[in-house]
Amino acid sequence: MCLAVPMKIVELRADGKGVAELGGSRHVVDLSLVDDVRLGVYVIVHAGFAIETLDQEEADATLALFDEIAHEVQPDSPNLNPEP
Amino acid sequence: MSSDKVVQLAHGGGGRLTRELIEQEIVPRFGDGPLRGLPDGATLQAPGDRLVFTTDSFVVQPLEFPGGNIGDLAVHGTVNDLSVCGGEPKWLSLALIIEEGLPFSVLGRILDSVRAAADACGVAVVTGDTKVVARGQGDGIYVNTAGIGRALPEFSLGPERIREGDCVLVSGTLADHGIAVLSARQNMGFVNGPQSDTGTVQRLVMAVRELGAAVRFMRDPTRGGAGAVLNEIVEGRELGVLIKERDLPLAPATQAVAEMLGIDPLHAASEGRVILFCDREAAADILRRWRALPEGAGAACLGTVTRDKGRVILETVAGGRRLVDVPRGELLPRIC
Amino acid sequence: MNYIDGFRDPAVAAQFVRLIAEQGRALAGQGRRVHIMEVCGSHTMAIGRYGIRQLLPGNVELISGPGCPVCVTDPGYIDTAIALAGRGAILATFGDMIRVPGSDSDLSTCRSEGGDVRVCYSPSAAVEIAQNHPDREVVFLAIGFETTIAPVVSLVGEALQAGVRNLSLLTAFKLVPPALYALLADKEVQIDAFLCPAHVSAIIGSGAYEPFAAGYHVPCVVAGFEPLDILYGVNGILGQMLKGEARVENQYARVVRPEGNLKAQARIAHYLEPVDAVWRGMGVIPSSGLGLRAEFAAYDAEKKFGMPVRPGRQHAGCRCGDVIKGKLRPTACGLFDKVCTPDHPVGPCMVSAEGTCAAYFKYTLPDERQGGRK
């Protein structure tokens, strides 16, 4: 029920709102529900509002974990994907 | 007429004001060629034995959107339909239904775009009509174009020619027009946002002419997007299509906004792309020819034709498979 | 796209599928079937969109829960909205609500019959509409769970600040934790674990699920909406089940904190107070909704116009209630695909893009749609 995407803050405006970017496209977002927003921070945007900041360290840690998982060598793994 | 004047009902009444509108807006832009002298109909030299003929109406909102407006859309839409039927577009009719109150400045920009697009496509607007309806009875302006072209002898196109194992190619990124228009309607105020891909596909079609029978069928994925087109082609048939999510060509801004609004790019329109079914042996050649054109830079192989009766299936990036359904109802942004 | 693409890596997905298969086999060896309820509509959508059900072993089942605010909205709410439009109000709504069936009609039909219904991506658009139409009343259809509640209720503050008086909210806000209690209390619903919502959890915090893990011995894994997040989440649940654990595990720590978003929580508490709410198919759940506090009554459409929402009527054969509780698979509903389709939906589970039935219909291959298998 909560379609939201991570977007990078590229501008902070005088009226307290921010400009966030995803895929090169920039869009004004309301920042009143989050603290500590600086340029370069990623926020999760739902219905035009930032509802949280993305913790990049945690994100990178999760991605690193996924990377480890991807590189585990499993010599005799059966192919579990559905037959074409 | 000064730029802050608006179209009035009387401009459609057939009298002096109608004459003025025609002479000031239509004749300067389209009055060379068969429209000179404003005959009731255009008399044209038939271009060959077989003709391709199509019509389309355009009701897009907003009238002007990132990347284009209803004017060039109306030209490209009809020209592209002629092209994907294997035709060489030659002539267009242009019918306008204008809502009272439309500023002449907007009308002017739209008609300028029609002329520019027609020139770029090598077609002429040879006949047309103008009507005006009362305020509230139209969305600014509705446009209809009908087009005639010469059927190119090299092509013999038809969905019945598609075979299992054929490749499904697309000439560029998907969903750009649909997402651009939707985000403009939502007044989301994007900067560097999605841009419509409205444009002609003629050169893309001409580029594969020599491949003849290896080209089975073509469509342009307009309303309803690639999802609608692919489903229409396989519905009720013995064949299906398998496409791969990782191969879907998407422009970054379009993909980003589709994610934000919760829209499936397979359901959003393109207005300058071709989806082409071909013999798999010809796929690499077609992609090479397309990629040599600026409008074909993003050309890609979407997938293959299968024996999965009547179904369009997407192999997702997670490795699972799911149906690509026909889009249901209007494209609406969602929060859930 | 940054922080999105990395969570969609096919190679990692394949590895998770393998790990899940291994754990599934181990559980099967113990004679166990696992029923994981994914509460949130956005999870239902993502699972459909990425074809995830198909990748799971036969003894691991994902059940869609009531976390679709559209699906749990009573038809009477739509009736009241239509009535307001009939009195000349401009309805501003999220796109999700447009085709939800009321007792007799829906907003799409209302619009085609002349009702002024406008779709907004952001609730802030409603303030602009109100400012542009000072002579009309604007009513925002304020539905949603905790993620949406904070942005929507901000409308009241924006309106107050801008001196806008012709704007009000027709509220049907709902809370997730009370629904979880109700589900766990229902003997006919079998839930072994929860895949907890990503963004509701961002607001309420992963700590909100501690009472469920501890009190009901169900693993609660908070997972994001990307395909790797979901697979990682399922894998985590199976891991806990194999070890007999029942913990809250926050796998979406890049966004979710244990305490949640305190600022958002404060704003919600400032404007809203708990109310009993009717959940379509589940009945009244006490204190499971939020309504505007008395001092903001001027922005409460029901009070402003004297039009309280009353329960509406549903199609007699509609089983959406059982579907959202996970008691019934869409394919087992007598109306599914025969009478009730996305083009002619009977109930909200088929209307909502993230409704369980719509997701099944749109995404699931027909030969997967048997009653027994997922």
Image (cartoon, rainbow, N blue to C red):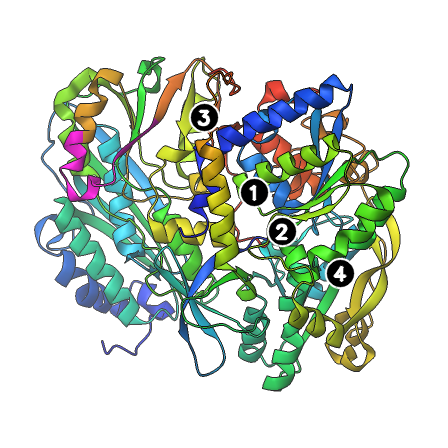
User: Disc 1 designates what residue?
Assistant: C229
Q: How far is the residue under mark 4 from the one under mark 2?
A: 21 Å
Badge nearest the viewer, 3 or 4: 3
Please tell me which residue is depicted at 64% across the width and 73% down the height of the picture: C154
Mark 3 and mark 4 on one chain: no
User: Disc 3 designates what residue?
Assistant: A73
Above or below C204: residue B58: above
Q: How far is the residue under mark 1 from the one under mark 3?
A: 22 Å
Chain under numbered label 4: C
Amino acid type shown at disc 4? Ala
Chain under numbered label 2: C
Q: How far is the residue under mark 2 from the one under mark 1?
A: 10 Å
Q: Position of residue C113 (x, y in %)?
A: 63, 55
* Pointer 4 with pointer 1, Cβ within 8 A: no
Q: Position of residue A40 (x, y in %)?
A: 40, 67
Please tell me which residue is depicted at 35% across the width and 65% down the height of the picture: B191
* Pointer 2 with pointer 1, Cβ within 8 A: yes
Disc 2 crowd rating (10 Å Cα; few below 14, some 14-19, many 20+) is many
Amino acid type shown at disc 1? Asp
Above or below C33: residue B102: below
* Pointer 3 with pointer 2, Cβ within 8 A: no
- The quarter of the displayed image where residue B88 is located: top left
Above or below A55: residue C26: above
Q: Position of residue B17 (x, y in %)?
A: 27, 70
Mark 4 and mark 2 on one chain: yes
Disc 1 crowd rating (10 Å Cα; few below 14, some 14-19, many 20+) is many
User: Disc 4 designates what residue?
Assistant: C172
Q: Position of residue C328 (x, y in %)?
A: 78, 31
Disc 3 crowd rating (10 Å Cα; few below 14, some 14-19, many 20+) is few
Chain under numbered label 3: A
Task: Please report the bounds of the magenta region as a residue range.
Answer: B288-302
Q: How far is the residue under mark 4 from the one under mark 1?
A: 29 Å
